[in-house]
Amino acid sequence: MGSLKFEVEWEDPLAARGQELRATWASLRILVDNQPVTRVEDSRSGSVRSHLHLPLYPLAEWLAANWWSLLAESPPDREPQPGFHRRHNLRFAREGYALPNLSFIPAGERTTLVWKPESIPQTDVAFLSEGSALLDSTLVRDELASLVETVIGRLDDRGLHETPLQQDWAAIRDAEPEEAEFCRLAARLGLDPYDLSDEMQSELIEVAGRIPHSLHEEFFAAANPTQLRAQVESLNDSLGVIRSMDSRLPELDSLRRALDRPLNGSSWEQGYSTAREVRSLLHADSRLIPTHEALMNVLRVDPEIWAGAVTMPRTVQPFSSLMAMNASRSPGFVVPLRPEEAWRFELCRVLFEFLSADKPEVAIATRTRSERQKRNRAFAAEFLAPAGLIRERLPDECVGEDDITDIAQEFGVSPFVIRHQIENHGLAQVS
């Protein structure tokens, strides 16, 4: 896993105005995987350097103001709440100074950092670096917090107290666990936890109390804040379908117990490797699974007791599929009605959630891009359309849309799945 480092050296503020700005004037270097994101060309001096000269108070204040979003708000499949980029990109903390075009995009246990070159004429510098990195979210949180604490320590040393930054950070630092959880849930919806109406606060607390705690992260990342009550009703209706079932699927439980855990590698690699291991355990390495019946046969389960299905308006679906343990402590699955190829794909996503859990209880697949959802998508793609079997069917090193469509029909998946398998595994060029 990569690294993030803010290197700070306090400097003479020269002619800077404002107590907070003068107190926190510094040289700042931001390193990601030991590479300087702050590498700039200075047109005044004609030089290239890896550090910036600026007051750190505005940056620390921006971090505190957007703290919960930086920790919890992933870009959803739905239209993001207004201001998503303002809450996640350092360029919105500039206040007339030079800061890189650097985005922090959390996705559960991992956070993606993306930085791009950009010229800032009013500061006479141009940022030169470009790249991305996937970092442990705890590491990112701790390094951002360390920077804020460093700036507050500097203010304290200079006799400055009760600034907005210090007040905001005290509220974050001293938040009780329940308050911090509330703030994270609001942030996942794209909302400012400190700027909610009393009605919205009550609704959020009510909805959170009506769903299993283990679903909070994924549910609220996928939910629409204008339809929370309808979406929680949809979720609980589906859970009711499963919990009313008394079917037993010992074959799946035996399969789960036979799998190796814990998983290693990136989210995609974890999903791929699990799919290959499951196929191997089922002696199905080279079998195609193009239909519902073929899937049931490979998994050795009775189609009549396999899954429940509920009909719900697509506008209020908070999930793509759901897994929970039923009355017999056996897994049950709900997939909202959709075309068969999509139905099987979504079913396999929550099948992965059951198979990969040490103690399965309840899980949902959603349309978000969290690390968890990346894992179950990768599993479904590799289980239904293994890269090795696709490679055998490629007519050339370059394939077109007609080739992709033909292969998709043979595997019983969407052309989108085949295209992504080809591209993600480097099987061929897509023209």
Image: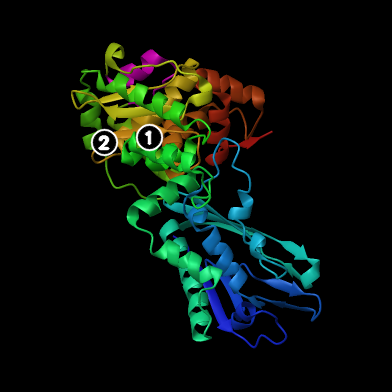
Residue under the point 63% across and 51% down: 85
Give the image's coloring scheme: rainbow
Going by the numbered disc 1, the residue's amino acid type is: Ala
Residue 218 horizontal/vertical position (percent):
42, 39
Nearer to us in this view, 118 or 212: 212
**Picture layout, residue 300 above or below residue 24:** above
**Picture layout, residue 375 above or below residue 63:** above
Residue under the point 63% across and 76% down: 55
Helix, strand, or loop for circle 2? loop
Badges 2 and 1: C-beta atoms under 8 Å apart? no
Residue 321: within the magenta? no
The part of the chain drawn in magenta is 284-300
Q: Is residue 209 left or right of residue 127?
A: left
Going by the numbered disc 2, the residue's amino acid type is: Pro
**Picture layout, residue 184 above or below residue 342:** below
Q: Which residue is mark 2?
A: 360
Q: CA distance from mark 2 to mark 1?
A: 18 Å
Say which quarter of the image contains residue 116: bottom right
Q: Earlier in the sequence, mark 2 or mark 1?
A: 1
Nearer to us in this view, 212 or 27: 212
Rendered-image quadrant of the C terminus? top right
Helix, strand, or loop for circle 1? helix
Nearer to us in this view, 262 or 174: 174
Q: Is residue 136 left or right of residue 240?
A: right
Q: Which residue is mark 1?
A: 275
Q: Is residue 58 left or right of residue 206?
A: right
Q: Nearer the viewer, mark 2 or mark 1?
A: 2
Residue 227 horizontal/vertical position (percent):
50, 30
